Image: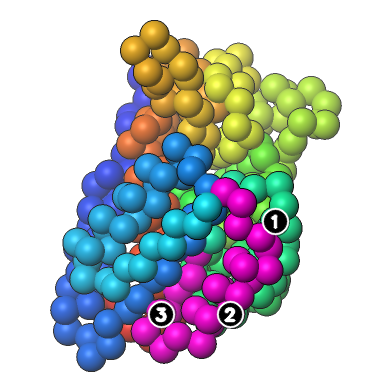
């Protein structure tokens, strides 16, 4: 068996097209503010991609690139200003943040009504209760990929390897809402391989290159690799996932590539959240 490619580029392109059309006919121009503190290279690439996609879709984009030594008070003051700015409907603070800044304090000060990442405790609570106003971008992107490719989670055993607030925890909640039977695993899980082999749908988000190997995967499973790891090479770097792609592709029925998989969907879902926060109906 050789797995089919669970591509993220095609569904992302469809979402961007829908966003563009919705913005064209809307009386309100949605606005997204992205704040980056410091000069982390990977973050800079990601912020630039967000800015470019906003421009392509007709969304007002404001990018604030703050110096590494920015204080927490200065960052919080900027966020409060954006909370009161009627032209801005979504606010995102790019991770990672310098050590002098408390990430929880940053998340708490963003207005829930402008929380483009779905990180604020109020919006997380709405997600847990089954009544979300916005969705966490990367987990929602993974679910949209399944939908696009005609893969149903209903009634199937799903395992999420990873328990971060950004991906692992919310992804499990979205799978539960899609009627999957959900489990979580992590670095302290005993006999992880045996647990992975029970999963019909295996989602991996641990931040370790090649962490899931072929012997950990059930024959015919759907494998969604959320990891993006930069591996240094003589001529620069390459991107790889958390799954040993070549070996696992020989056992899985579907597998996501890295890059070109879930990562391609994350920005699409971010912009969709921005439209929702602006009150714009999506097609």
Specify which label sits upstream in the sequence, 1 or 2.
2
From where the camera sits, is residue 2 visible?
yes
Inter-mark Cα distance, 3 to 1: 23 Å
Q: Which residue is mark 3?
A: 88
Q: Quadrant of residue 173?
A: bottom right
Task: Identify the disc placed on residue 39.
Answer: none
Q: Is residue 180 left or right of residue 272?
A: right
Q: Nearer the viewer, residue 39 or 115?
A: 39
The spot of residue 163 in percent (x, y) is 70, 45
Task: Say what secondary structure mark 3 lies in.
Answer: loop
Specify which label sits upstream in the sequence, 2 or 3.
2
Region in magenta: 68-92
Q: Which residue is mark 1?
A: 101
For the point 60% across and 66% down, the residue is 75
Inter-mark Cα distance, 2 to 3: 12 Å
Q: Residue furthest top?
A: 234
Q: Is residue 7 left or right of residue 232?
A: left
Q: Which residue is mark 2?
A: 80
| Quadrant that contains the N terminus | top left
The spot of residue 207 in percent (x, y) is 60, 32
For the point 53% across and 81% down, the residue is 81
From where the camera sits, is residue 129 visible?
no
Inter-mark Cα distance, 1 to 2: 16 Å
Q: Nearer the viewer, residue 273 or 255?
A: 273
Near mark 3 (Cα within 10 A), the count class, few <14, some 14-19 or many ≥20, is many
For the point 41% across and 45% down, the residue is 44
Task: Say what secondary structure mark 2 lies in.
Answer: helix
| Quadrant that contains the C terminus | bottom left
């Amino acid at each position: 068996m050789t797995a089919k490619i669970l591509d993220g580029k095609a569904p992302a392109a469809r979402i961007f097209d829908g966003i563009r059309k919705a913005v064209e006919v809307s009386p309100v121009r949605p606005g997204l503010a992205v704040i980056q503190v410091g000069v982390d290279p990977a973050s800079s690439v990601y912020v630039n991609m967000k800015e470019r996609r906003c421009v392509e879709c007709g969304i007002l984009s404001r990018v604030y690139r703050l110096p590494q030594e920015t204080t927490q008070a200065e960052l919080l003051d900027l966020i409060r200003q954006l909370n009161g700015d009627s032209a801005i409907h979504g606010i995102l603070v790019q991770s990672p943040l310098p050590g002098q800044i408390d990430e929880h304090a940053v998340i708490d000060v963003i207005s829930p009504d402008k929380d483009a990442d779905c990180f604020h405790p109020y919006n997380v609570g709405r997600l847990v209760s089954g009544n979300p106003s916005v969705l966490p971008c990367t987990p929602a992107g993974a679910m949209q990929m399944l939908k696009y490719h005609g893969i149903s989670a209903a009634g199937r055993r799903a395992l999420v390897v990873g328990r971060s607030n950004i991906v692992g925890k919310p992804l499990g909640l979205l799978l539960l809402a899609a009627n999957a039977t959900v489990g979580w695993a992590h670095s302290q899980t005993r006999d992880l391989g045996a647990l992975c082999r029970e999963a019909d749908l295996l989602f991996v988000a641990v931040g370790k290159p090649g962490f899931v190997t072929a012997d950990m995967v059930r024959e015919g499973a759907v494998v969604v690799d959320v990891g993006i790891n930069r591996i240094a090479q003589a001529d620069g770097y390459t991107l790889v996932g958390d799954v040993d792609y070549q070996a696992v592709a020989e056992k899985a029925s579907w597998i996501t590539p890295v890059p070109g998989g879930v990562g391609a969907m994350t920005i699409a879902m971010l912009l969709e959240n921005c439209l929702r926060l602006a009150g714009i109906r999506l097609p």
